[in-house]
Image (cartoon, rainbow, N blue to C red):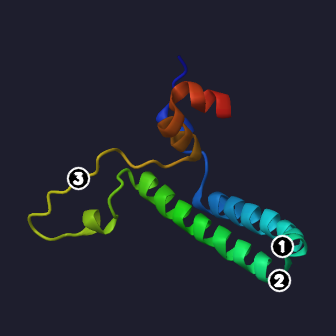
Amino acid sequence: EVKLSEEEDHKSSFSQCTFNMANILMGVGMLGLPYVFKSAGWIGGFCVTVGFCLVTWRTSYYLGRELNGDPRPVHLFDSELPGNTITRMRKPITSFPAIAREAFGDSGCICLS
């Protein structure tokens, strides 16, 4: 059984994650758009693009909740009101390998690496 230490989980900085996300979204998205419009036409291409935008937005919403460590909205935990006894269900996730480990277990994390 392979266990990664806490230090190995924190390999990516915020700027590296931002660069990686921008690279993936702009690179693949910009290369695929002309093909979508060629295949589906102007109206169909627009509908497909909007549809995938909505799917991506919703996926990022759910991913953000998982990274928070709880499926409930983050504003519940940031409240500094007296008597706020809401705690997170799990420790917040801070890296992509931790997401894989949470979703697929240790063997799935190794397989995806």
Up-down: is 23 above or below 110? Answer: below
Compute the Cα span from label 1 to label 3. Answer: 48 Å
SS assignment at label 3: loop
Label 1 amino acid? Ala
Badge 3, how many Cα within 10 Å: few under 14, some, many 20+?
few
Residue 16, above or below 51:
above
- The answer to which of marks 1 and 3 sits earlier in the sequence is 1
User: In this picture, is 37 found above or below 96?
Assistant: below
Q: Which residue is drawn at 23% across and 53% down?
A: 87
Q: Marks 3/2: CA distance?
A: 48 Å
> Which of the numbered marks, if any, corresponds to residue 40?
1
- Residue count near mark 1 (Cα–Cα under 10 Å), binned few <14, some 14–19, many ≥20: few
Identified at 61% across, 50% down, the residue is 12
Closer to the N terminus: mark 3 or mark 2?
A: 2
Residue ID for mark 3: 87
Q: Can residue 72 be seen in this view?
A: yes
Residue 60: which numbered mark, if any? none
Q: Residue furthest top?
A: 1
Q: Which corner quadrant holds the C terminus?
A: top right
- Nearer to the camera, 107 or 52: 52
**Marks 1 and 2, how far apart in space?**
7 Å
Identity, as a three-letter code, of the amino acid under mark 2: Trp
Query: Which residue corresponds to mark 2?
Result: 42
| Kind of residue at badge 3 | Thr
Residue occupying the point 84% across, 66% down: 32
Q: Where is residue 58 in the image (x, y as percent from the top left)?
A: 52, 65
Which structural element holds mark 1? helix
Residue 24: where, in percent of width, then height?
74, 61
Left or right side of 87 for 55: right
Label 2 element class? helix
Q: Residues within 10 Å of mark 2 (few under 14, many from 20)?
A: few
Q: Where is residue 51 in the image (x, y as percent from the top left)?
A: 65, 71
